[in-house]
Amino acid sequence: MKTSMLFIRAPEGIAFSQLLAGPVTRFIAWFIDQLCIGVAMFFLGTALNLLELISWNFGFALYVITYFVINIGYGIFFEWNWRGQTVGKKLLRLRVMDVEGMRLQFNQIVVRNLLRFVDSLPAFYFVGGLTCWLNSKCQRLGDIAANTAVIRSPRVAEPDLDQLLAGKYNSLRQYPHLAARLRQRVSPAEADVALQSLLRRAEFEPTARVELFADLAAHFRTKVEFPAEATDGIADEQYLRNVVDVLYRTSQVQSSKFKAQSSEQAAALNQL
Amino acid sequence: MIVDLQRFIAVGRPFWAELERMLDRLEAEPDLRMTLPQLEHFHHLYERTAADLAKITTLSSEPETRRYLENLVARAYGEIHETREKQRRFVPLKWFFQTLPQTFRRHVRCFYLSVAITLVGCAFGGLAITFDPGSKPVLMPFSYLLQDPAKRVAEEEKDTKNRLAGLRTTFSAELMTHNTRVSIFTLALGMTWGVGTIVMLFYNGVTLGAVAVDYIRAGQTKFLLGWLMPHGVVEIPAILIAGQAGLMLALALIGRGSRAPLKTRLREISGDIVTLIFGVGVLLVWAGFIEAFLSQYNEPIIPYDAKIAFGTVELILLSLFLAKSGSARRPEPKNPDE
């Protein structure tokens, strides 16, 4: 079955997943890379023009060879030195990785880049795009031969929770042990549904909105039962706000602390 | 189980940071060999981080920590479970005189198949031009080949003023890049279960056979050998080796007689394919120089006998290189576990 995720399960029982990049994103990254090659060749051509003043023959020969080497070697050079990324992939947050999560080897990078010759047939990567579209891991022929896949690590936009949840008393916070249990029992997907429904509340029809928040509140009430004084007289939408607040707000404080500590540690490690 | 996130992060962080530091070192220094205690410690850190990831995976909070741990575990997983030999520093001379010929010999059957397909193409081209001389424009891709061989030889031999003077370096560069492109294409077409590679080899054979028979029938055998041999004895084997690599790819795809899964079959040959295609590149650079700076000179500038002798020496050296070079030492196994 075709999914947008690459699942890797380690023998230790740990599973981790990576989001696969689709053909369109990859095409845009390739287009950016072509622009980079074009710009590089423009500057190189200008420099070699000066050489042609001395010897046209030698200057042009150098241009022909350099163009060929850059065209073929661009992807190999960057993907090897930037751990699976080129300029286009970096901008779109894509990365080449081994399809089984192993260390990406130089051979794999060379094979996937050389097989572009077939993937790009007859024009604009039609064969590669079609294979990518049909393949369950979104691989073009070069990726299949090299056992690689291109993954996407999208930047998660952080919602403005302060504005969304500002100035409201959260009665659920009065029961920290229950709040902790709620965080434990709610899955990431459920938490995201709650957050998205609040963020998009203005887009719903009034009746649909009431029904949606009633359903969601009922769902989250089954997760952890808070005492009646914490939930009585609270509208479904407000209950959901409180739930989102419990799920996301504490973690944000901790995340930022963790990030700050990590960067301090990284700086310290770099000095070693 | 309720996780106290703050404590969980505070306790786990030093281990995660240490694992990250070890991974950075491993990735930055390909030659790094860890001692047994270091390996044990590395494995311990990996298992501990993996366990932390398992704990946090079910939590809706802390998506960033989860992503960070997923990334760490994925990197460490690759280092620990990778069974392929770690890439060592590239030594060009060792690669050229040992790795390349050893790899060629390991897959010599594909080379023989490549030669056989080209020979069938040669026979087809030769027969076609013999029985249907009118097919010349279809069989020969270059316009200068379409004229009468005897007329062309007379023109070439008359041209003592160095027709390509001032253009040889450019001509050489264009030959190198064009031939390398064709070779890579021949290899890459292996992904069509070998059909594309076979077509390319057959078509090259057809052209070669048609040109050869055309010149032989016109009584220009000596010119033909003098013109083709200096560069052809290197260029043609290079294309055949590219075909060999393409056929290796095709055989791995087909997987006849092998119970290994497709991924494993492709993994096993990918290093060898890269070695062969880089070898093809080196041979074609040499052939490009020779074609531009030697093959285009004819009698009376350079006697045909000298050119043929040069080509023969090249052919002997290339054959010895591919058959014998690096064979004194036993080839290293690809996988130490095998």
Image (spheres, coloured by chain):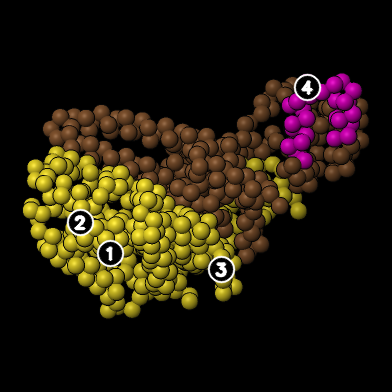
Chain colours: A brown, B yellow
- The residue shown at (18%, 54%) is B295
Q: What residue type is labelled 1?
A: Phe
Q: Is the magenta stretch mostly helix, strand or loop?
A: helix
Say the numbered circle drawn on residue B205: none
Mark closest to the chain's N terminus, 2 or 1: 1
Left or right relative to A75: residue A170: right
Q: What residue type is labelled 3?
A: Gly
Q: What residue type is labelled 2?
A: Trp
Q: How far apart are marks 2 and 4 (CA)?
A: 77 Å
Q: Which residue in the protein does label 3 denote?
A: B255
Q: How far apart are marks 3 and 4 (CA)?
A: 55 Å
Q: In this view, does B168 lie above or below B330?
A: above
Q: Which residue in the protein does label 2 denote?
A: B227
Tag 1's secondary structure? helix
Is residue B87 visible to the viewer in this orientation of the structure?
Answer: no
Q: Which residue in the protein does label 4 denote?
A: A203
Q: Which amino acid does label 4 sit on?
A: Glu
Percent from the top left, x then y, of residue B161?
9, 42
Crowd band around label 2 with a 10 angstrom C-alpha radius: few (<14), some (14–19), many (20+)? many
Crowd band around label 4 with a 10 angstrom C-alpha radius: few (<14), some (14–19), many (20+)? few
Numbered disc 4: what chain? Answer: A
| Depth check, front residue: B168 or A120 | B168
Mark closest to the chain's N terminus, 3 or 1: 1
Numbered disc 2: what chain? Answer: B
Percent from the top left, x then y, of residue A258?
57, 41
